[in-house]
Image: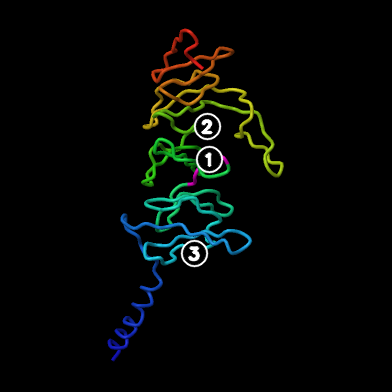
Amino acid sequence: MQSLNKLMWVLLLVPFVGCSQNKQFSNDDYLYLVVDTTGTLMKYGYKDEQGKMVIPFGKYYMCFTDTIKTIGFVAIPKQGFWAINKNEDQLFKVYVYDNGPDRVRDGLFRILDEHDLIGFANMLGEVVIQPRFERVDHFSEGLAGFCEDCLYEPVLGLGGVVDNKALGRKIRGKYGFINKKGEVVIAPKFDSIRWFENGRAKVGIGDKEFYIDKMGSELLFHNDEHD
């Protein structure tokens, strides 16, 4: 009789447990952004391919990815921007760019660790370069500029907070370039840099500005070939 009672309890609990579990999505499943504009503020959520709401309106302050194939970018109140997967695992905190999550450039975007050091991840949700940079630019033509031992003058941020990492005047530090493996390919020796375009980047040392190639060699121009 006791065995029969235990079996009945198991049978009753199985459907309850199954209903309480979240659906796990495969690599072939997509989620699609939907926006509720009926209220004062827009609300964001996601539906699956059958039109079922799987991420309810208002769970995230804002959603930035139209179709989540592998990962998507969302804003979480008091936590900033995050990359999540289709099962809503928080993968990485995302670097802030232009008041939103960092843009994907050359297939990579910048991420932050708990110490606000910067690294890079890809759209498969993989960390490509572990966070270790205090300042590093986005990738362009396979290279990204970084600053070694940088210090910037304080800039007054929102609410009177002083932000030493804001875009103030650089007091010290040198710029160089890394590749997509995180390897330093052009040593940090420049006082200013621009990203690479058409195989060249504008850099500066002291009052001198000039262009370099991807090996870090100075380019010589004739008849005002440079802009």
Q: Position of residue 114 (x, y in %)?
A: 51, 44
Q: Amino acid at mark 1?
A: Asp
What's the residue at 59%, 13% (across, down)? 207
Considering only vertical position in the picture, is 217 above or below 15?
A: above
What's the residue at 47%, 39% (across, down)? 110
Q: Which residues are magenta?
A: 93-98
Disc with the residue nearer the chain's start (1 vs 3): 3
Label 3, residues with CA under 10 Å away: few <14, some 14-19, many ≥20 = some
Considering only vertical position in the picture, is 193 above or below 138?
A: above
Under circle 1, the secondary element is loop
Q: Amino acid at mark 3?
A: Pro
| The disc label shown at residue 209, or none | none
What's the residue at 41%, 25% (across, down)? 184
Residue to which mark 3 is pinned: 56
Residue to which mark 1 is pinned: 116
Gap in angstroms between the C-alphas marked 1 and 2: 10 Å
* Nearer to us: label 1 or label 3: 3
Assess whether residue 97 is covered by the magenta stretch: yes
Residue to which mark 2 is pinned: 135
Rendering quarter of residue 105: top left
Considering only vertical position in the picture, is 211 above or below 123?
A: above
Label 2, residues with CA under 10 Å away: few <14, some 14-19, many ≥20 = some
Q: Position of residue 209 (x, y in %)?
A: 54, 14
Disc with the residue nearer the chain's start (1 vs 2): 1
